[in-house]
Image (spheres, rainbow, N blue to C red):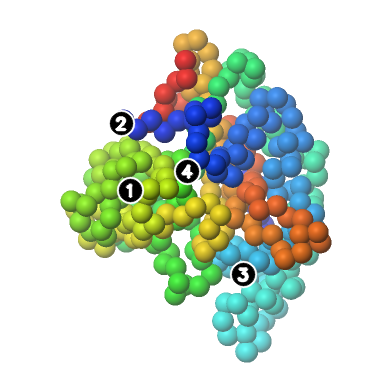
Amino acid sequence: MFFKVSTTLIIALTFSTLSAQVHPKEALGRKIFDSFRTNNFKSLYDSSIFSISEENFKFLLQNIRNQSLRNDLISIHSLPFPQDASNAEQRWELAFKHNWRNEWRHLSRFTPERIHEEAMLPILKKAREYEIQWKTVQLIAIEILLPVSWQNGRFVIQGDPDLDDNASSSRTLYLDRNLNYRLRLDNKTYSKAFMIGTDSEDSDLEYKTGILGNGTGQGDILVRFDRNTPDQLHYFCPDLKGAGGEIRVLDFHHTNRPNQRHDLLLTFAYGSPPEAYQILVPQVLTNLRPPSNPKQYPLPDLPIFCERPRWIGLVRLPRGLQYPY
């Protein structure tokens, strides 16, 4: 189916001291967490793709700037494409025209009752198994979880490509300011240090501000950039050439990038002594641009989640985080 339902630098949330505008993804994470904490299903449902109208879904799908999602719909197009549909944009127009209603019908099968049963109740049930009292939990981190692997001599980072292959390389990594990222390197990256710098290969030009674990070659790498971060950086392996790519550092309202899907990782503390627990919210789709006539299609310029939140449960306190008490 198209939308799966499925410093010491301490990168932690201190809500009362944030001076910058709250990033929409961080706000979404807080809203989703509070929906579980207060057992407020309406708030959870309103944060999902299942809550939008047919008109807004059509607009979202038609204007999505994400080649992976477009390719998914093109691949299920059952009719042969005419010979004059020679490029991806022309094939997309036909695939969208013939298939968007089927996608909407699939989405509409997920009623509020079903979402409540499949997306909310399992989380609450798991929390009860740990005897968690939601009134006393404290949210300590909202992060974008970016899996990093190694393939064909280079780092591969989870992300979705832009529509124009000539304008954006698949290696390009888009990172927003004022948002926490946790880059998690898998076993395939063993012995290959991941470094961020101002040059594409020079380890002497390592960029350190707002990064924990840069170039260490072990553990998660935590990133939080701010308004002083350069617009362009690079990630690379200091021991192997050609392993990295460009990093574009953007404000969250910047539209010149793909509408990527990201997994949102919520970490909270409970107990005495405190222990860390996590919930994963997969497939958060953001940078939705509203149409020219907002009265006709009042689709907010906010992220939404497209797949069921998942309970991860009890974990060791992740790198870079600290308990709030």
Q: Residue 191's spot in the image, x, y percent?
A: 23, 45
Q: CA distance from mark 4 to mark 3?
A: 36 Å
Q: Quadrant of residue 21?
A: top right
Comes first in the chain, label 4 or label 2: 2
Comes first in the chain, label 1 or label 4: 4
Q: Residue at x 41, y 61 (%)?
A: 172
Comes first in the chain, label 3 or label 2: 2
State left or right for residue 83 relative to residue 209. right
Q: Marks 3 and 4: in contact by CB < 8 Å? A: no
Residue indicated by mark 3: 75
Q: Residue furthest top?
A: 272
Q: Which amino acid, mark 2? A: Thr
Q: Residue 127's spot in the image, x, y percent?
A: 62, 22
Q: Residue at x 70, y 24 (%)?
A: 38
Q: Is residue 256 above or below residue 226?
A: below
Q: Which amino acid, mark 3? A: Ser
Mark 4 residue element = loop
Residue indicated by mark 2: 7
Mark toward the viewer: 1 or 4: 4
Comes first in the chain, label 4 or label 3: 3
Q: Is residue 65 above or below residue 52?
A: below
Residue indicated by mark 4: 178
State left or right for residue 4 relative to residue 152. right
Label 4 Cα crowd, 10 Å radius (few <14 / some 14-19 / many 20+): many
Report whether residue 295 is seen.
Answer: yes
Q: Residue 120's spot in the image, x, y percent?
A: 70, 33
State left or right for residue 76 relative to residue 108. left
Mark 2 residue element = loop
